Every structure is written in C-alpha cells, then in structure tokens.
Image (tube, rainbow, N blue to C red):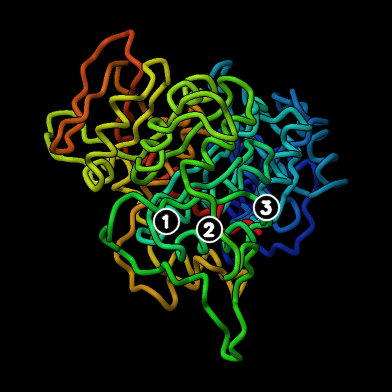
C-alpha cells in the first residue's frame, strides 16, 4: 500500500524522488487509477508509459473499452491501452453519476478533423484538447449546411478568422461554403479572399465584390494589400486563382447565381459586414439566373441569417455595420421577408474574445508563410482585435447548443440613425445572443485558437 501511495503522489505531484523508470505493475496502476477517479471527479487523462498527465494532444476514447465503470473493469482498460496508445482516461457522466474508464487514442493537436472522425466512428461525444483543457463536441448531426459568407474584408482581421473557421468546418464535413461576398469596395479585398481560398485548399469557391456600396469606409487595420505580398526574391508569397487579369462577379449578382442553384429553404447566410450586397439583392429584378425578383428569390432559397451586429438591451447606440451604409441597411430591413430566421451576435458578446498578435503568431508557427500570420508580422501592430465575426460563423454551423443564451423571440427595427430596436414577440423572426460568462468566452477563444493550428 505504501508503494501505491508513493506512486499516486508521484503521478499527482510529480515528486522528484520518484523515478519514472521504475517498473510499475498493472495491479499498482489499476489501484492508482481508481484513486485518481476519486481525486479528479470531473475526469483525468493518464499516460501509462510516462506516468504523467499529457499536456498536449487531442484525446479520444476507444469504443472497445466503453461501459467500463467500476474498479474491476480497470485492468481490461489498462490491457487495451498497453496494446494501443498507452493512455487511460476517466470521466464522470453527470446524468448517471457513473465514472467511466477508457483506453484513449492520442492525436496530434493539428489533426482535429481526424480526431473528430475517429470519435464519431467510435461513438464518442467529445474530443478532449489536453493543452487547452476543453472538450470539442463530436456527436453533431451531419446536417446539410450551405453557407454564403458575406464580409467587409480588408479592415478588421476578425473577418479572416471567421473565413478560416468556415474552411476548417469544411474539412470536418460540417458545412459547404457556397461562396464569399465582399461588401467592402476595392478589388484588393476580394484578392485577399482569393489568397485565403487557395491557402486553405478551396481555390474554386466563387467570390463576389461590391462595386456600388459604401464609399471609402473606415479602415481599422490596413491589410487589404496582403494578396500582393512578395518574398525577398520578388516572388508572390501567396497563390491566387483569379489573378491580376481576372474579374469578380458583382456581389449581389453572385448571390442571385448561387441562390438560384440551391434547393428551397437550404441556404444559411453568415453576414459579418455591411448589408449593401444583401440590400441590392433584395432590390434586384429577374435576370439570367432566375425569373424571380430579389425578394422572391431570397424568400424561397434562404433559411436563416446569422449577423454580427446590433446593439440591444438598454443601450441606444447605433450599430457601425448598419450605420456605415444606412440607406442600404434601412432598405434591407424593410424588404427582408418576415419568415427568415435572424440571429444577431452583438459586439459585446465578442468583446472578451481578445486574440493577441503574440498568440496568433505562436499558433501559426507551423509555417513561415501564412497570410494571417504575415499580416500580424508585417502589416499591423497589435490593435487588440476582438473575435467578433467568428461568432456568427460558429453560431451558424454549431447551432444553438454552443450559445450561452439567447433573448426571447421578437422583431428588430432599424432606425434612421442606426439603432436596432427589439420588440419581444413569440412569433417574431429574430433573436440576439446574450454575452456569456468568462468560462464560455474562454472556451470560444480556445476553440478558435485550436482551429488556427490546424494544417
């Protein structure tokens, strides 16, 4: 018994007097693991080879050892672990109160898509990220989520991270990105999306560009020339599909083309910028892509819109994205069909999600030439960029379960000065996200960071 207590103390406290090279019997390991289940009621992960808790890697339990939840079953779990990855995990089911023991497979941190696929194949609900100490949901329904991403690329870098999230969701087979609409004028902004498409392995995703929207909108972080970055030898750093000689379709026309080709009520729009292209779409008439008016086409094809924007509660501040093109915005709210579900993510929800330049560069150190990393190295100092825009994408793909809480249903009215007024009504088409607590905000930022290191 004394040896077991010394072993357990070494595991928990990493006592320098205990040599990890000592031979430990499976019987002693089983006893120590049982004691750990009492010490760590919420769960643990333990490497049988190093006699330590792993500090990195993505952990997924094997199906072969599921339903092992008593002391007598631990030796079977250890035996399976020895034959595979030599890792044992423990966790308590809050619904049943049972403590489960599993043989665990360890994936590299940059293999989230593979870890999630393995988890689904083995009937596991989550993947555990040991470095960030978060669980990533894996038992999601394989829904047919078809997304059009509408952004004001070229100013705030959260647009880039929201787009990055969509590529990673595509890697996981969680959505299809139909196209990207850039509602900030200037070809360079569309070229930046072209770079991102190519870098993340989706070079054929179509891009639309606004040409009749907000004139000279404010630029917060001047990264719009990222697409033209060159090496010291004068060669382009990043590949593009459209190139200097190519052209981009008008933003609202790309909307019409994409929507016309989709099944009815199948399209989700993630809007994180101005609504100029959406407004022009709703005001458009029949064309070569559809005999329907813009409102008719929108109503037939669009299921819901997730928007980064709005100011709710007791505040009467105006919203920047809507105010920047107020005439377009007023027309958008006027013409928007009332049966389209609207989910707003106000700015205050993303305010705690500060992703520092140092963290970004660290997370992307797996490569020397990365478009987002390059921006933070050469085009901007750290301006305390918050991760507002990724929330609309996360909400759209993950669904309600990942949200901290919502407002009741109601209707949103935009005033001529850019205020978003909410009137509660159970029959309303709109909800807005309520800021989460520190734990929720920390989880979301860690989730975005986990996506950043995938390659």
Mark 3 packing: few (<14 Cα in 10 Å), some, or many (20+)? few
Q: Which one is nearer the viewer's eye here, 261 or 34?
A: 261
Coordinates of residue 178 in the picture (x, y in percent): 60, 40
- State the residue at coordinates (46%, 63%): 187
Report the disc number at residue 193: 2
Whole-angstrom CA distance, mark 2 to mark 3, is 11 Å
The kind of secondary structure element at disc 3 is loop
- State the residue at coordinates (52%, 77%): 229
Coordinates of residue 264 in the picture (x, y in percent): 59, 20
Residue 124 lies in what quarter of the image?
top right
Image marks 2 and 3: residues in contact by CB distance under 8 Å = no
Horizontal side of 236 relative to 313 (left or right) equals right
Nearer-N-terminus badge (1/2): 1
The kind of secondary structure element at disc 2 is helix
Whole-angstrom CA distance, mark 1 to mark 3, is 18 Å
| Quadrant the N terminus occupies | top right
Nearer-N-terminus badge (1/3): 1
From the viewer's perspective, is residue 279 above or below residue 184? above
From the viewer's perspective, is residue 440 above or below residue 68? below
Q: Residue furthest bottom?
A: 233
Which residue does the numbered mark 3 point to in the structure image?
204
Horizontal side of 44 relative to 423 (left or right) equals right
Q: Which one is nearer the viewer's eye here, 160 or 403?
A: 160
From the viewer's perspective, is residue 108 above or below residue 440? below
Coordinates of residue 32 in the picture (x, y in percent): 66, 42
Whole-angstrom CA distance, mark 1 to mark 2, is 8 Å
Image marks 1 and 2: residues in contact by CB distance under 8 Å = yes
| Quadrant the C terminus occupies | bottom right
Which residue does the numbered mark 1 point to in the structure image?
153
């Amino acid at each position: 018994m004394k040896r077991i207590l010394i072993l357990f103390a070494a595991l928990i406290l990493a006592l320098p007097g205990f040599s990890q090279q000592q031979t430990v019997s499976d019987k002693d390991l089983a006893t120590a693991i049982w004691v750990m289940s009492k010490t760590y009621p919420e769960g643990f992960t333990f490497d049988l080879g190093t006699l330590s808790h792993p500090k990195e890697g993505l952990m997924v339990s094997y199906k072969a050892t599921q339903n092992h939840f008593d002391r007598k079953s631990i030796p079977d779990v250890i035996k399976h672990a020895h034959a595979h990855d030599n890792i044992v995990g423990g966790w308590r089911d809050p619904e049943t109160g049972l403590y489960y023991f599993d043989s665990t497979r360890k994936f590299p941190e940059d293999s989230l898509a593979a870890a999630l696929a393995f988890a689904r194949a083995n009937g596991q609900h989550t993947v555990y990220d040991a470095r960030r100490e978060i669980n990533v949901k894996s038992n999601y329904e394989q829904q047919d989520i078809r997304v059009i991403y509408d952004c004001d690329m070229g100013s705030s870098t959260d647009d880039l991270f929201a787009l990055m999230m969509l590529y990673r969701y595509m890697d996981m087979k969680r959505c299809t990105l139909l196209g990207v609409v850039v509602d900030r004028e200037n070809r360079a902004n569309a070229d930046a999306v072209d770079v991102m498409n190519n870098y993340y392995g989706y070079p054929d995703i179509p891009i639309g560009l606004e040409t009749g929207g907000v004139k000279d909108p404010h630029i917060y972080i001047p990264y719009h020339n990222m697409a033209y970055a060159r090496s010291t030898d004068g060669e382009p750093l990043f590949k593009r599909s459209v190139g200097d000689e190519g052209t981009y379709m008008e933003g609202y026309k790309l909307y019409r083309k994409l929507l016309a080709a989709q099944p009815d009520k199948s399209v989700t729009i993630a809007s994180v910028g101005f609504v100029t292209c959406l407004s022009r779409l709703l005001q458009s008439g029949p064309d070569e892509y559809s005999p329907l008016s813009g409102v008719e086409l929108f109503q037939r094809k669009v299921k819901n819109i997730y928007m980064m924007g709005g100011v709710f509660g007791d505040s009467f501040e105006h919203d920047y994205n809507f105010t920047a093109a107020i005439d377009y915005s007023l027309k958008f709210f006027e013409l928007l069909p009332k049966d389209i579900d609207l989910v707003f993510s106000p700015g205050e929800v993303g305010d705690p999600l500060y992703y520092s330049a140092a963290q970004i560069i660290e997370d992307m150190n797996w490569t020397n030439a990365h478009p987002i990393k390059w921006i933070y190295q050469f085009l901007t100092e750290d301006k305390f960029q918050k991760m507002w825009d990724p929330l609309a994408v996360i909400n759209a793909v993950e669904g309600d379960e990942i949200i901290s809480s919502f407002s009741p249903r109601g209707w949103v009215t935009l005033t001529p000065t850019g205020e978003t007024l909410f009137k509660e009504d159970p029959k309303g088409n709109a909800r807005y996200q309520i800021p989460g607590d520190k734990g929720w905000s920390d989880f979301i930022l860690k989730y975005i960071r986990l996506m950043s290191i995938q390659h």
